[in-house]
Image (cartoon, coloured by chain):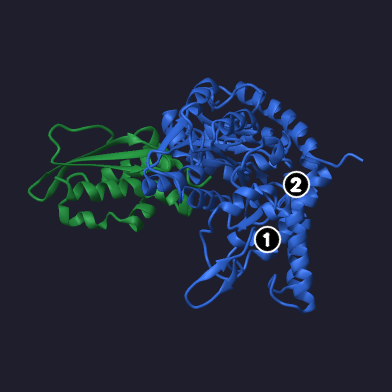
């Protein structure tokens, strides 16, 4: 049986059953949680809670096994070769920081870090910092006026043998789906380590790390209908084993004496301290939920929804969409400006009728500067949104225009 | 929609003190990097009295209306009376209770004014 998707799915999300009029279009910032995720976490705290990997008593064993089962589910979800390659962090930002700090330790002055102009602060700033520390050279694959990567330029830039390629799989501003496989392939042939920021892509597209063939990939739980407070860093086992840990403490060690310590192998080496236990189990439940729908269904549904929204957006007078105008390699994230209507005023007026959008630079200041726009309004759709949400947005935009102009 | 009430929309649509003046004695610019809003105040202060005050800039309804309301109230007042122009006063004048994120919009011109008073 085909599992429901779109508006019908709102029935599975308590926030929507309790707020029937809520039109939530800020899914690029974070997604709502299905009841199954909340129940899994609630059940854990009520029935079994204990720390993981420590106790030998019954409930500790149960929690540890639920926790490690979730790691297996996450590994299968992105087609990782082994669950050992799944590292739990605080969020996607922490995963990207871990990668930058650990990898750059043996980088040398003048080494090139190749990023894209689409990167959000989470993938950019950790490399700026590593750059300052190790005198690295940051270079950027340019963005074309329609919000796509300049692939010809990228091919040239990769010839200069960057030490690492850092790129987003999907922009949280323009909705652009980038050419990860092609660029990863070229970068690896040039000897680069490849890092993919899948924070935005993971809820919209099937992520297969073996197909992408990258070396490291980061995403967060909260953008995948799981709880906040948990990020994932996936890495190739042989690379992770070579990378030094960047945080130290309990659980990440093998042996400790007063003067020194030896470290555990992966994933423990990168997971110092008590992890976000309930969150990991919650993400496992979110992945079961998504698997029931299937990422194939998600992709085809969102392609239809994107086409509908694009058509609607192009009909709105004086609205300028930032990013691709055609429905090829783009998702349902729409950043826009409207003449004479400030994004903050728009967001406030939409909020007054129950429509949540984001206004600002969406943690991507350099890209906004490049486009010469300080701030945009952003409506981002996901699996539980439908055409009626787009219609509500259009109604709200007209109302805002009436009030302001 | 109680934020976008008559008084605010009136100052936004028909600002009284938007512009520049010749030979200002005090100037300041304040930006909100989150949204790109920018308010500039130009003051002409003589013998401890604001002779003229104007503003210019770009921003949302709240920041621009607040700038104009502030400018209206500081025309021809002695400097020792400027201290009443604070957050509480401004919210009272505008008659709004903005959310924490929108409060920054309202306060932008106030910060610009305070900066102008110390810049000469």
User: Residue B58 appears in which quarter of the rendering?
Assistant: top left
Compared with A257, A399 (above or below) is: above
Compared with A59, A311 (above or below) is: above
The answer to which of B81 and A120 lies nearer the viewer is A120
Q: Colour of chain A?
A: blue
Compared with A148, A21 (above or below) is: below
Q: Where is residue B119 in the image (x, y as percent from the top left)?
A: 17, 47
The answer to which of A392 and A83 lies nearer the viewer is A83
The local crowd at label 1, few if under 14, some if 14 to 19, many if 20 or more residues have their Cα within 10 Å, is many
Q: Colour of chain B?
A: green
Residue at coordinates 61% horizontally, 64% vertically from top-left? A264
Q: Where is residue A249 in the image (x, y as percent from the top left)?
A: 54, 69
Q: Can residue A34 be seen in this view?
A: no
Give the residue number, with chain letter if any, for mark 1.
Answer: A279
Residue at coordinates 37% horizontally, 46% vertically from top-left? A132
Q: Position of residue A96 (x, y in %)?
A: 54, 48
């Amino acid at each position: 049986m085909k599992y429901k998707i779109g508006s019908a799915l709102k029935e599975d999300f308590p926030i929507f059953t309790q707020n029937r009029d809520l039109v939530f279009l800020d899914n690029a910032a974070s997604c709502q949680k299905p009841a199954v995720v909340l129940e899994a976490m609630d059940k854990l705290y009520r029935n079994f809670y204990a720390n993981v990997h420590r106790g030998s008593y019954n409930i500790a064993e149960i929690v540890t096994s639920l926790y490690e089962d979730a790691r297996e589910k996450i590994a299968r979800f992105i087609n990782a070769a082994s669950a050992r390659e799944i590292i739990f962090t605080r969020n996607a930002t922490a995963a990207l920081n871990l990668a930058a700090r650990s990898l750059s330790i043996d980088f040398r002055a003048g080494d090139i870090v190749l990023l894209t102009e689409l990167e959000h602060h989470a993938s950019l700033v950790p490399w700026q910092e590593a750059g300052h520390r190790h005198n690295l050279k940051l270079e950027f694959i340019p963005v074309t006026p329609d919000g796509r990567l300049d692939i010809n330029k990228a091919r040239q830039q990769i010839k200069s043998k960057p030490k690492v390629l850092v790129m987003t799989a999907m922009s949280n501003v323009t909705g652009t789906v980038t050419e990860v496989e092609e660029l990863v392939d070229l970068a690896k042939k040039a000897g680069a380590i490849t890092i993919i920021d899948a924070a935005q892509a993971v809820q919209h597209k099937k992520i297969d790390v073996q197909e992408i063939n990258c070396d490291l990939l980061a995403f967060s739980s909260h953008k995948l209908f799981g709880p906040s407070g948990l990020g994932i860093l996936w890495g190739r086992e042989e690379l992770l084993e070579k990378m030094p840990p960047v945080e130290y403490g309990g659980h990440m060690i093998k042996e400790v004496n007063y003067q020194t310590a030896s470290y555990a192998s992966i994933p423990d080496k990168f997971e110092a301290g008590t992890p976000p236990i309930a969150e990991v189990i919650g993400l496992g439940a979110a992945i079961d939920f998504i698997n029931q729908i299937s990422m194939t269904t998600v992709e085809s549904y969102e392609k239809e929804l994107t086409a509908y929204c694009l058509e609607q957006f192009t009909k709105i007078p004086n609205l300028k969409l930032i990013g691709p105008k055609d429905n090829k390699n783009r998702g349902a994230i729409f950043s826009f400006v409207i003449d004479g209507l400030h994004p903050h005023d728009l967001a406030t007026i939409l909020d007054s009728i129950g429509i949540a959008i984001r206004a600002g630079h969406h943690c991507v200041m350099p890209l906004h500067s490049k486009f010469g726009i300080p701030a945009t309004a952003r409506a981002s759709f996901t699996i539980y949104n439908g055409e009626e949400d787009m219609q509500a947005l259009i109604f709200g935009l007209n109302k805002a225009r009436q009030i302001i102009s | 929609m109680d934020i976008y009430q008559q008084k605010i929309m009136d100052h936004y649509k028909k600002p009284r003190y938007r512009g520049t003046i010749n030979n200002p004695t005090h100037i300041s610019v304040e930006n909100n990097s989150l949204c790109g809003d920018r308010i500039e105040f130009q003051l002409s202060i003589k013998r401890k009295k604001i002779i003229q005050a104007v503003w210019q800039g770009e921003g949302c309804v709240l920041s621009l209306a607040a700038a104009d309301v502030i400018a209206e109230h500081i025309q021809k007042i002695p400097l020792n009376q400027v201290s009443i122009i604070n957050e509480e006063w401004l919210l009272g004048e505008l008659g709004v209770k903005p959310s924490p994120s929108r409060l920054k919009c309202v306060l932008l011109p106030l910060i610009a004014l305070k900066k102008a008073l110390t810049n000469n």
